[in-house]
């Protein structure tokens, strides 16, 4: 029996620019201004839904169990796909489909992982499945490369956040607008035509926070899969008076890949030789556009009302070879 070992090389280049103070006086003024702005930003943080939050003590009060994949862990591990980090969470079972993480299959505590239909999948607290109530399958998976952290909630506490929570809740969290002006650029490349480029800009002016991120990811052939992805996300946040705040988020995602349902057969796998592309002309084109507006009104420091209005559309255009695996009878 022969075995195939695929070596995959990735090289990273990361750059981050934060606008410096030009003079001591400007630096002091900026420090004072930044402190004031920082206080305001903390008070009027981006009004997205964090199912766990930033206080570690909250985890001890959550019914069931909860885990947080921090930004530090994401930076340290530099995962190629989100599956790599989610596998580190106890009770989370991942089934790879094409090795790139384009279609997530997650099962929690022994439930069927097919298309993650038993897990409520969120991005910044907003559902991302095709139709959360009627068709909860995951044909779109947020790119882990643009995430700040990931929250995982298991148990009865997940019922608060929407439908399909029998397995739990997974919430992807993206970057918020920064207090200081910040520009980010990250480039990585590898074998088999792999390329990942990320660019981002964020700032806060006149109490208005803005953050824009763009991601491009592609590969000619990883295993039998090729793909081309463009992903852009923008956030704006600002206070409305002393007791309310609002956050606006828009995003667009475009993917072209050959990651369809047709893979290798059991006979091919058992033989252990190089993969054969059974349907070389297969293609899947996915386009997703989304927008959300979240408003918070504070009755007191501990009591507030949050209202979220969101909408999204996902288009799947398939080009699939149709054939039967059974031998043709004479």
Image (cartoon, rainbow, N blue to C red):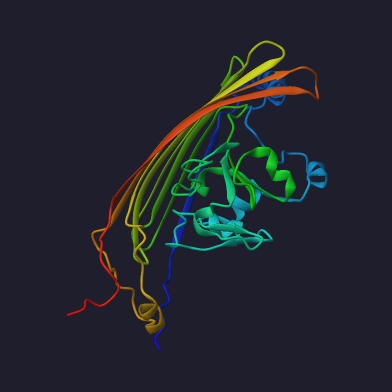
Q: Farthest left residue?
A: 330
Q: Is residue 253 visible?
A: yes
105 relative to 268, above or below: above
Q: Nearer the viewer, residue 200 or 2?
A: 2
Q: Nearer the viewer, residue 104 or 159?
A: 159
Left or right: 256 in relation to 160: left
Left or right: 143 in relation to 38: left
Quadrant of residue 123 in the image? top right
Q: Is residue 235 visible?
A: no
Q: Residue at x 64, y 13 (%)?
A: 240
Q: Farthest front residue?
A: 330
Left or right: 154 in relation to 277: right
Q: Farthest top residue?
A: 241
Quadrant of residue 6 in the image? bottom left
Measured from the top left, where is residue 120 in percent x and y?
59, 46
Measured from the top left, where is residue 260 in percent x and y?
35, 58
Measured from the top left, where is residue 132 in percent x and y?
53, 41
231 relative to 40, above or below: below
Q: Residue at x 48, y 48 (%)?
A: 141
Q: Considering the image in quadrants, where does the N terminus appear?
A: bottom left
Q: Considering the image in quadrants, where does the C terminus appear?
A: bottom left
- The mark total stands at 0
Q: Nearer the viewer, residue 88 or 66?
A: 66
Q: Residue at x 35, y 53 (%)?
A: 227
């Amino acid at each position: 029996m022969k075995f195939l070992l695929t070596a995959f090389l990735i090289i990273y280049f990361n750059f981050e620019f934060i606008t410096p103070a030009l003079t001591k006086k400007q630096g002091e003024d900026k420090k004072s201004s930044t402190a004031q702005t920082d206080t305001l930003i903390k008070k009027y943080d981006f009004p997205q839904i964090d199912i766990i939050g930033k206080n570690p003590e909250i985890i001890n009060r959550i019914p069931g169990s909860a885990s947080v994949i921090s930004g530090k862990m994401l930076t340290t591990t530099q995962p190629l796909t989100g599956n790599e980090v989610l596998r580190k969470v106890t009770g989370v079972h991942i089934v790879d489909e094409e090795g790139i993480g384009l279609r997530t299959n997650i099962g929690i505590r022994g439930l069927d992982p097919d298309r993650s239909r038993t897990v409520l999948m969120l991005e910044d607290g907003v559902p991302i499945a095709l139709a959360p109530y009627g068709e909860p399958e995951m044909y779109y998976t947020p790119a882990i490369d643009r995430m700040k952290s990931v929250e995982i909630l298991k148990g009865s506490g997940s019922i608060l956040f929407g439908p399909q929570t029998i397995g739990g809740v997974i919430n992807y969290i993206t970057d918020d607008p920064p207090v200081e002006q910040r520009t980010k650029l990250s480039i990585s490349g590898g074998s088999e035509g792999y390329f990942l480029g990320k660019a981002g800009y964020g700032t806060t002016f006149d109490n208005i926070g803005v953050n824009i991120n763009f991601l491009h990811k592609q590969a000619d052939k990883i295993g039998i899969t090729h793909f081309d992805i463009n992903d852009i996300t923008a956030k704006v946040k600002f206070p409305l008076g002393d007791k309310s705040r609002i956050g606006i988020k828009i995003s667009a995602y475009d993917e072209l890949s050959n990651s369809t349902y047709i893979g290798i057969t059991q006979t091919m796998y058992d033989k252990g030789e190089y993969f054969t592309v059974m349907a070389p002309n297969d293609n899947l084109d996915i386009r997703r556009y989304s927008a959300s507006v979240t408003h918070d009104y504070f009755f007191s420091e501990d009591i507030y009302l949050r209202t979220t209005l969101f909408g999204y559309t996902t288009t799947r255009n398939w080009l699939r070879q149709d054939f039967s695996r059974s031998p043709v009878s004479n």
